[in-house]
Image (cartoon, rainbow, N blue to C red):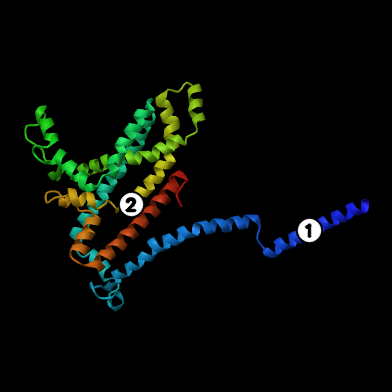
C-alpha cells in the first residue's frame, strides 16, 4: 500500500516536471498569451487605420510637384517647397484669413464652457422625463445639414420680413428692419452664436456622461455636511467635470485651424466675406476653384503642422499648470 502511494506521487512529480519543461519549451506564459490575443484583436483596427488614415498621406506628395490634372504624379516635375512659399506670397489675404480663423476659434473656445453649464442645468431637473426631452430636443440641431440651417437662419434673421424683425418691430424695440447676416461688424459673433446653437445639446452629452460617473457618495457626504444644491454643484460636480473639460479644451486648441467649411461657405456673403473667409474656405477657393491642387495640398500640410504645434503647446501648458496631460 505504501509502495503504491509512493509510486503515484512519483508519477505526479514526473507529470509536473514534464509540464514545466513543456511550458519552458513553448516560452509563453499565460500573461503573454493574453497579450498576444489582445494584439490580434487590435490588428484589424490597426490595419483599417493604416489603410484609411495613413495610406492617403501619399497625397501629400502633390505639394512637392508641378501637378497637372491628367498627368501622372510620377511624371510631374519636382518643385520642392515652391508651393509652401506661395502660401505666404499673398500676405494680405493670408493674414486676413488667419485673423478670421484664429479669432473665430478663440471665440468658440471661450464658449466651450456653455455645454458644461447646460449639462449641469439638465442634471438638476427633477423631472427626468422632461430632462430627456430637453436633452434630445437640443441635440437634434447637430444632425441637421448646414443647408437646412442656412434656410432656417435666413428665414429668422436675414430678410426685412424675417421673424426677428417682425417681433422686434412689433414690440417697438426697433424702427428699421435689421439684416443680421449682412452686418460685418457682428459677423464673428453671429457665426459663433449659430454654431453654439447647433452643437450645444450634442456637446452637453459628453458632460452629462461625466456627471453620471461622479461617485454618488460625494453628494451624500455633502448633504450630511449641510450643503445646498448650489454648493454641491460648486464643490462636487464642477471638480468632477474639470478633467473632461480640459481634455476637450486641449482638443479645441489643437483644432483652432479647423473652423469648418459648410457654415462659412453658406452663411457668408459679399458684405461679410472679409470677416468670414476662414482657412478651409481659402483652401477651397485658392486650390480647388483655381485648380491649383499642389497649392491646396501644401495648405493642408501647413494646417496639419500648425495643429500639431498647437496641440503640443497646449499639452505642455496643461502639464506645467495642472500636472496632467493627454500624452
Q: Position of residue 60 (x, y in %)?
A: 32, 67
**Which quadrant would residue 303 be assigned to in this image?**
bottom left
Nearer to the camera, 231 or 128: 128
Is 189 on the left-hand or right-hand side of 240? left
The residue sitting at 30% across, 42% down in the picture is 199
Quarter of the image holding residue 137? top left
Q: Residue at x 21, y 45 (%)?
A: 148
Please state which of residues 90 and 136 is positioned toward the viewer in this rendering: 136
Is residue 248 among what the camera can see? yes
Look at 37% across and 39% down and name the residue there. Answer: 205
Q: Residue 102 at what x, y percent from top left?
A: 27, 51
Report the disc number at residue 255.
2
Mark 2 or mark 1, whichever is nearer to me: 1
Residue 31: image x %, image y %? 63, 55
Kindly identify which residue carries mark 1: 15
- View extreme (left): residue: 176
Crowding at dot 1, Cα within 10 Å, few <14 / some 14-19 / many 20+, comes out as few
Q: Looking at the picture, tell me which residue is in the foreground, 93 or 287.
A: 287
Residue 71 lies, in percent from the top left, at 25, 75
Does residue 327 sit above or below 194 in this rendering?
A: below
Q: Secondary structure at mark 1?
A: helix
Q: Which mark is residue 141?
A: none
Q: Is residue 207 left or right of residue 75?
A: right
Describe residue 202's horizontal placement relative to residue 274 as left or right: right
User: If you read the primary sequence from the N terminus, does the residue marked by circle 2 or circle 1 appear first?
Assistant: 1
Secondary structure state at the residue bearing disc 2: loop
Amino acid at each position: 500500500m505504501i509502495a503504491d502511494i509512493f509510486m503515484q506521487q512519483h508519477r505526479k512529480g514526473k507529470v509536473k516536471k514534464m509540464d514545466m519543461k513543456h511550458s519552458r519549451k513553448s516560452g509563453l506564459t499565460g500573461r503573454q498569451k493574453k497579450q498576444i490575443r489582445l494584439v490580434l484583436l487590435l490588428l484589424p483596427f490597426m490595419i483599417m487605420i493604416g489603410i484609411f488614415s495613413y495610406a492617403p498621406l501619399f497625397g501629400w506628395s502633390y505639394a512637392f510637384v508641378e501637378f497637372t490634372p491628367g498627368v501622372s504624379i510620377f511624371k510631374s516635375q519636382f518643385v520642392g517647397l515652391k508651393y509652401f512659399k506661395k502660401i505666404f506670397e499673398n500676405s494680405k489675404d493670408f493674414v486676413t484669413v488667419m485673423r478670421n480663423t484664429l479669432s473665430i476659434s478663440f471665440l468658440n473656445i471661450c464658449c466651450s464652457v456653455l455645454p458644461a453649464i447646460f449639462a449641469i442645468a439638465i442634471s438638476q431637473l427633477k423631472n427626468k422625463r422632461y430632462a430627456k426631452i430637453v436633452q434630445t430636443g437640443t441635440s437634434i440641431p447637430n444632425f441637421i445639414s448646414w443647408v437646412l440651417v442656412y434656410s432656417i437662419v435666413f428665414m429668422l434673421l436675414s430678410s426685412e420680413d424675417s421673424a426677428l424683425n417682425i417681433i422686434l418691430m412689433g414690440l417697438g424695440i426697433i424702427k428699421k428692419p435689421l439684416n443680421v447676416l449682412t452686418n460685418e461688424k457682428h459677423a464673428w459673433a453671429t457665426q459663433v452664436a449659430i454654431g453654439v446653437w447647433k452643437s450645444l445639446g450634442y456637446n452637453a452629452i459628453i458632460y452629462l456622461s461625466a456627471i453620471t460617473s461622479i461617485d454618488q457618495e460625494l453628494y451624500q457626504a455633502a448633504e450630511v455636511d449641510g450643503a445646498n444644491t448650489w454648493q454641491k454643484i460648486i464643490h462636487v460636480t464642477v471638480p468632477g467635470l474639470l478633467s473632461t473639460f480640459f481634455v476637450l479644451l486641449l482638443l479645441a486648441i489643437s483644432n483652432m485651424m479647423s473652423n469648418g467649411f459648410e457654415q462659412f461657405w453658406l452663411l457668408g456673403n459679399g458684405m461679410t466675406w472679409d470677416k468670414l473667409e476662414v482657412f478651409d474656405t481659402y483652401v477651397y477657393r485658392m486650390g480647388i476653384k483655381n485648380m491649383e491642387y499642389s497649392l491646396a495640398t501644401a495648405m493642408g500640410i501647413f494646417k496639419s503642422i500648425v495643429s500639431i504645434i498647437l496641440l503640443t503647446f497646449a499639452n505642455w501648458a496643461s502639464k506645467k499648470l495642472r500636472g496632467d496631460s493627454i500624452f
